[in-house]
Structure formats: C-alpha cells, structure tokens
Image: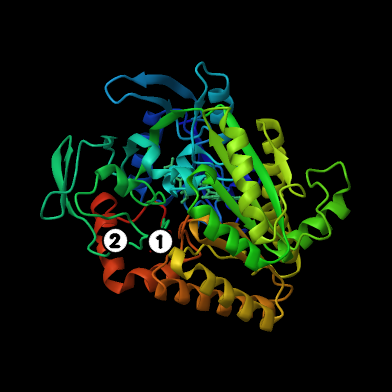
C-alpha cells in the first residue's frame, strides 16, 4: 500500500484547519481510487486505528483535525468524471471525486456549453466538494438558492466495514414508522431516524431528520462520522446570463434593517445574496487596506459608510436591468441609502472584485487569530454560526451589541443577513479575553436556541462545538445520533471526536 505511509514532519499541514485547532497523526493515506480508500479503512479496522478524513481543511470547527491515528486525505481523488444531462429529470449534473475543489468545479462549468451553474457558493473556494457535502456548506447565495443539500443527486459512500453504499436521491425513504431500510450487499440495515425537530432556519447541526426523509440526507452534513464520500453527483442549473452586484454603503444599522424589510416584499428586487458588514468589520478592512496598500483586493471604502450590504441579483432577461435598478432607486432613499453613492457592477468581473472584498474579511480575522496564537497557543477562533427565525433577527442583533460593547472585546459582525445568520467573530488579545469571549459566545448560543434558531447554520459542529449541539438537541437527541453512528461504525473509528 504505497499510498499509506508513516506520518512525518513534512506533513504538518494536515494537522490543522482554519479553526486553528492543531492535532497529531501517526499515518497518512493519500488514496487515488475508491479501492484504495477501502484498503485504508480495512487496514484501520483490522488494527483498531482511528481515521480522520481530510478535505481542503478550510473547515472552521476542527472536523478534519486528527487526534492521533490515520489521516485520510482525499486530495488525489480530484477528477471531474462527467458532465451530463438527465433527460428524465430535465436537469444537468456533474459527477466528481470528493477532492475536486470548488474553484476547479466553477472553472470547468464556466467553459461548458451551455454555461452551467452550481449555486451553493461557500466563500472559500479551496474547499473540496467532499468537505462541503460533509458539512452541508452554504454561502452568500443560499438566500436565493438554498444550501448544498438540495443539489446532491447521488453519493457513493465507503463504510468502515468495507461496504460501499451507492445512494441516489429518491430511492430510499423512511417509512411510516420512521424506519430507513438500507439494502447492503450482505444484509438489510434498518435505522430509526432521530425524533428531534430541527429548527426552521438554515441549519447544519446534527444528523438530518424529517418525516419520510431520504437516506441521502442522513449523510449530507454528517461531518464524516458515518462514511467516506468517494463520488458525488451534483445537480446544476443553467447559468443566468445577467448579474447585478451592489455594495450599498449605509449610515446606520437601522437603515440595513429597513432595507431588509423592504426587499422581502418587492419581488423584482428580491436578490439571491444579501450580505452584511458592521462598522467594526469595515474599520478592520480599512486598516487592512492601509497595511497592504492600494494594489490589494480591498478598494477604498467611503468615510461616510458605517455599515455595508452586498446585494446580488442574477436574472435571465437583459430588459430587467432597468426595472431592478429603477425599483431599487425607489426603495433605497426611504432606508437612508443612495444608489448613486453605491458601488454597482453589471458583470462577472466586477462582481468578482466585490467577492474578493467579502472574502478578505474572514481571511483577515483568521490571520489575526493565527497572530494571537503565537503568544497564546490555546486560543482558537471564536466565530458564531447562529441563525434565528426572521422575526428574531433584530432582537439577536441588539443582544450582540449590548453584550459585546459592554465587554470591551474586539469583534466584528458580518455575514448572511438574508438568512438571519450573522457571524460574530470575537478577536481576543489575551487568555482572559478569550475566556470572557467564550462565556459570551455560549450566552449567544443559548439565546439562539431559545429563539428557535440553530447553533450551527453552515460550519458544522466538528470538535469545537459539541457542547452547543447538546444544548440544541438535548441528551436524548445525542443518544439517537449515537445509535445511528454505531450502526455504521460500531468501533467508533471514523472521525472520532467529531459531533460526539
Ligand atoms: C475564509 C473562509 C470563509 C468561509 N466561508 C464559508 C461560507 O461562506 N459558508 C460555509 O458553509 N463555510 C465557509 N467556510 C468554512 C469551510 O470552507 C466549509 O466548512 C467547507 O465546507 C469545508 O470544506 P473542506 O474541503 O475544507 O473540508 P475540511 O475542513 O477538510 O473538512 C470538513 C469536514 O468534512 C469531513 N470530510 C471532508 N471530506 C470528506 C469526505 N470525502 N467524506 C466524508 N467526510 C469528509 C472532514 O472529516 C471534516 O469533518 C469558510 C472558511 C474560510 C476559511
């Protein structure tokens, strides 16, 4: 097995992800085929070695960080196998290996005739497709198109016992008694789906469950705890040929909330992406621009801008351009915003520059955390991933400001305001600030659950948010998940420490 070797110092990069948690490993496996994945799992099972699955390691919760044992990286399984049209379903699809990155996929789809489009758009394009399915990733466009889940048509999954499940959406559903029956080569596996109710918000915390659920949905968002994805088929959409991207500079947070209220009731301007940056986020970007200079990806941000909303609308008919801009011009003044003073782009290239600005913010925060870690190695990122029902967004924002301002901690708030899902990133400067930040973070989690929201809308639970999952699903919910985990991985060797 030349793809399996003892771990050595040159493999350090595999020991952490973007959460900045660091682990250790004894073996590294770099399989090129499904068969080599199966050989790796069989070796691990025979020798009782824990296996940690590694994708692009852009995860923010330590899911791909090993705690000893074998590190299984999917980086060599990076082929785009087929782009096709399913006439029966009337939809386009792409079949990929799990190590294809989002940027490789986007590049390939751009060149296709007719132009095709994979709507989930998690900000970090070096993520692997396998990693995004394992964490049911979302992105800015989730507001208009939903998360990764509805775009998964088929999954092949290697299990710890050497079996491979080939699951096509629509084939296996839970029956009236909430049992999923899975025909495996040597046996039928019957599983009771969890009885907890998931919140009615964007969510990726806990194994998926719903009446008559599809088996494929159990695996999406399971964070590598049930099996290794070896092949993935994604549903694609025809690419809308026109796009408007606007950076709206806002004088106050109230104007952002007013804009949100107006936009939801006016269909012509209803966008696919709505992203928010608070005043601290803008100040951080201004500082970063000073540091890296004018040649960098951060454009000048007007001094008058206290907050910012990124608006993105994709559409099929060029004649709509004037209608959209005209309707916005009517709505915006009532929110205290001027379209003339905003940054408007009408093509992909211009919109890409806006996305660079959007991406620069979490990257800047992550690199600040890396800097703090040099002096305080125990510090990890304190980034919330809570979503709440629409009716509770304003209350949640008031709570964020009240607690954080009185704490005098350094923080930024940004993210997917359209989905009522904002990331609060606390940037501690000492161990004391880290401890205080953690306490406040947990208070916010409890508030999100009380309001009917989730503790993890897109980043998953990984190794860092297990207590939050317990808070949301309760002890009984965790026991129900453990039962499912045990059915696929009785010795608990796959991704140990994730979720449980
Ligand atoms: C700057 C920045 C911005 C980000 N923005 C977003 C955003 O907008 N939306 C969002 O959702 N996330 C975002 N993220 C988080 C991250 O990009 C996503 O969680 C992404 O889905 C992780 O993919 P990955 O390939 O890097 O997975 P990894 O971090 O390598 O792994 C994530 C989890 O998936 C498991 N896994 C990986 N491959 C497989 C496989 N083949 N089979 C089974 N399990 C597997 C791992 O074991 C781990 O538990 C951001 C991260 C950064 C650094």
- Residues under labels 1 and 2: Cα distance? 9 Å
> Which corner quadrant of the image does residue 152 belong to?
top left
In this orientation, which residue lies closer to the viewer: 250 or 75? 250
Image height of 9 relative to 281, above or below:
above
Here the colouring is rainbow
Judge by depth and name the residue closer to the eye, 357 or 77: 357
Residue positioned 54% across, 57% down in the render: 262
On the picture, is 8 further left or further right than 444?
Answer: right
Measured as percent of width and height from the top left, residue 23 is found at 56, 57
SS of the residue at dot 2?
helix
Quarter where residue 10 is shown: top right
Q: Mark 2 — residue?
A: 481
Residue 206 appears in the picture as rendered: yes
Q: Residues within 10 Å of mark 2 (few under 14, many from 20)?
A: many
Q: Position of residue 389 (x, y in %)?
A: 43, 65
Residue at which label 1 appears: 499
Q: Do residues under tags 1 and 2 come within 8 Å of each other at their CB atoms?
A: yes
Looking at the image, residue 286 sits to the left or right of residue 117; the answer is right
Q: Is residue 71 visible?
A: no
């Amino acid at each position: 097995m030349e793809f399996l070797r003892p771990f050595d110092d040159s493999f350090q990069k595999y020991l952490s992800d973007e959460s900045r948690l660091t682990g250790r490993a004894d073996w590294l496996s770099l399989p090129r085929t499904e068969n080599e994945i199966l050989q790796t799992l069989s070796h691990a099972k025979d020798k009782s070695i824990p296996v940690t699955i590694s994708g692009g390691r852009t995860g923010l919760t330590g899911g791909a960080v090993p705690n000893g044992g074998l590190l299984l990286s999917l980086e060599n399984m990076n082929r785009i196998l087929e782009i096709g049209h399913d006439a029966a379903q009337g939809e386009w699809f792409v079949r990929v290996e799990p190590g294809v990155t989002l940027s490789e996929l986007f590049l390939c789809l751009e060149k296709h005739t007719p132009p095709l489009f994979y709507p989930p758009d998690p900000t970090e394009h070096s993520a692997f497709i396998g990693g995004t399915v394992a964490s049911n990733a979302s992105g800015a466009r989730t507001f208009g198109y939903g998360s990764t889940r509805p775009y998964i048509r088929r999954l092949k999954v290697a299990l710890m016992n050497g079996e491979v499940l080939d699951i096509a959406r629509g084939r296996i559903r839970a029956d009236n008694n909430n049992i999923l029956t899975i025909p495996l080569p040597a046996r039928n596996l019957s599983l009771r789906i969890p009885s907890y109710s998931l919140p009615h918000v964007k969510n990726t915390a806990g194994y998926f469950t719903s009446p008559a659920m599809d088996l494929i949905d159990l695996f999406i968002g399971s964070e590598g705890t049930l099996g290794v994805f070896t092949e993935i088929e994604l549903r694609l959409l025809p690419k809308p040929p026109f796009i408007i991207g606007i950076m709206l500079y806002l004088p106050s947070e109230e104007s952002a909330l007013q804009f949100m209220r107006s936009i939801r009731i006016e269909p012509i301007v209803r966008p696919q992406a709505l992203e928010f940056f608070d005043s601290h986020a803008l100040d951080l970007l201004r500082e970063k621009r000073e540091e890296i200079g004018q040649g960098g990806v951060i454009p000048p941000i007007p001094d008058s801008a206290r907050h910012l909303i990124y608006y993105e609308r994709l559409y099929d008919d060029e004649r709509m351009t004037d209608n959209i801009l005209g309707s916005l011009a009517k709505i915006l003044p009532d929110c205290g915003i001027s379209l003339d003073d905003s940054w408007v782009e009408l093509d992909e290239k211009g919109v890409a520059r806006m996305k660079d600005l959007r991406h620069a913010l979490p990257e800047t925060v992550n690199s600040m955390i890396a800097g703090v870690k040099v002096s305080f190695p125990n510090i990890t990122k304190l980034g919330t991933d809570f979503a709440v029902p629409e009716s509770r967004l304003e209350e949640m924002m008031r709570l964020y400001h009240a607690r954080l301002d009185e704490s005098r901690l350094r923080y930024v708030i940004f993210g997917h305001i359209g989905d009522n899902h904002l990331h609060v990133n606390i940037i501690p400067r000492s161990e004391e600030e880290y401890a205080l930040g953690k306490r406040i973070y947990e208070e916010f989690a409890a508030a999100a659950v009380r309001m009917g929201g989730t503790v993890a809308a897109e980043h998953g639970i990984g190794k860092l948010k297990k207590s939050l999952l317990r808070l949301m699903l309760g002890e009984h919910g965790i026991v129900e998940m453990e039962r499912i985990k045990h059915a696929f991985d009785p010795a608990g060797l796959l991704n140990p420490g994730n979720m449980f």
